[in-house]
Image (cartoon, rainbow, N blue to C red):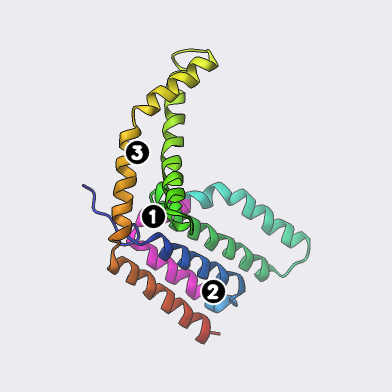
Amino acid sequence: MEKRSLLQNQHPFTKLIISLLLIVFALIASPLPFCCLFFLFLIYLLALPKIIIHWLQLLLRLLPLFITILIFGIIANDNFYDVLLLLARLVLMLMLSAYLFKSSDISQLATILPAHKDLQTYLQATLLFVPLFFDNFDQARSQTGNLAEIVNLSLKNTHKHIDDIRLKIDNITQKETGFDLLADLYGVLLLILAVLIFLFIR
């Protein structure tokens, strides 16, 4: 079994708090503390390098948008450094989104919502069921051209995995009750350093 990293073992609420706090800091921090926060978070993500890889892929896809924003800023005679700071803030937002989604199982994200336990279970099952259904839908579409038959076949094949979905939800519930304290302390350390940077670096 592949060993899970500290970031993957963090409780979803820890990830949510980190993301929300850093979003606020990214929006209001002046350039120097912002740069410190940016590189601090980048170092923090080295615990799970695939997040950085995914983030870089997002940057490449959005590169034309960033170039367009930069050109419009120059045409509008905006301060060049202000435009660069805006782009840097957007880049950090992308990094945070990559952190939140690539370090979490998609069904675990439902536990972030302060909902009733039954509703959380429903959301987890839905998040597991929907991708499985569309996988079966693509397979069924190659077998027949009739939409009703495709949907019916997709539902039948997906229903065969109901027990697997229940097992995954049970495993998620067990992980929730036994989250990794060291992983969450790693996140708390990031929060402490971020607050110190924000308060004392000008």
Q: Residue at x 50, y 56 (%)?
A: 97
- In the picture of the structure, the residue carrying the numbered disc 2 is 34
Is 41 within the magenta?
A: yes
Q: Tell me where residue 15 appears, x and y as whole percent.
A: 43, 63
Res. 158 mark: none
Q: Which residues are magenta?
A: 34-56
Q: Tell me where residue 19 appears, x and y as whole percent.
A: 49, 64
Q: Residue at x 34, y 68 (%)?
A: 184
Which amino acid does the dot numbered 1 rest on? Ser
Which amino acid does the dot numbered 3 rest on? Ile
Residue 9 position (above or below residue 81):
above
Residue 125 position (above or below residue 139):
below
Q: Residue at x 68, y 53 (%)?
A: 68
The foreground one among 162 and 127 is 162
Q: CA distance from mark 3 to mark 1?
A: 20 Å
The foreground one among 79 and 93 is 93
Looking at the image, do the residues carrying marks 3 and 1 touch, with CB atoms under 8 Å apart? no
- In the picture of the structure, the residue carrying the numbered disc 1 is 103
Q: CA distance from mark 3 to mark 2?
A: 42 Å
Looking at the image, do the residues carrying marks 3 and 2 touch, with CB atoms under 8 Å apart? no
Mark 2 neighbour density, 10 Å: few (under 14) some (14–19) many (20 or more): many
**Which one is closest to the eye, mark 3 or mark 1?**
3
Asked which secondary structure carries label 1, the reply is: loop
- In the picture of the structure, the residue carrying the numbered disc 3 is 165
Outermost residue on the bottom side: it is 200
Q: CA distance from mark 2 to mark 1?
A: 23 Å
Asked which secondary structure carries label 3, the reply is: helix
In the rendered structure, which disc, 2 or 1, sits on the residue that comes first in sequence? 2
**Which one is closest to the eye, mark 3 or mark 2?**
3
Q: Tell me where residue 130 appears, x and y as whole percent.
A: 46, 36
Which amino acid does the dot numbered 2 rest on? Phe
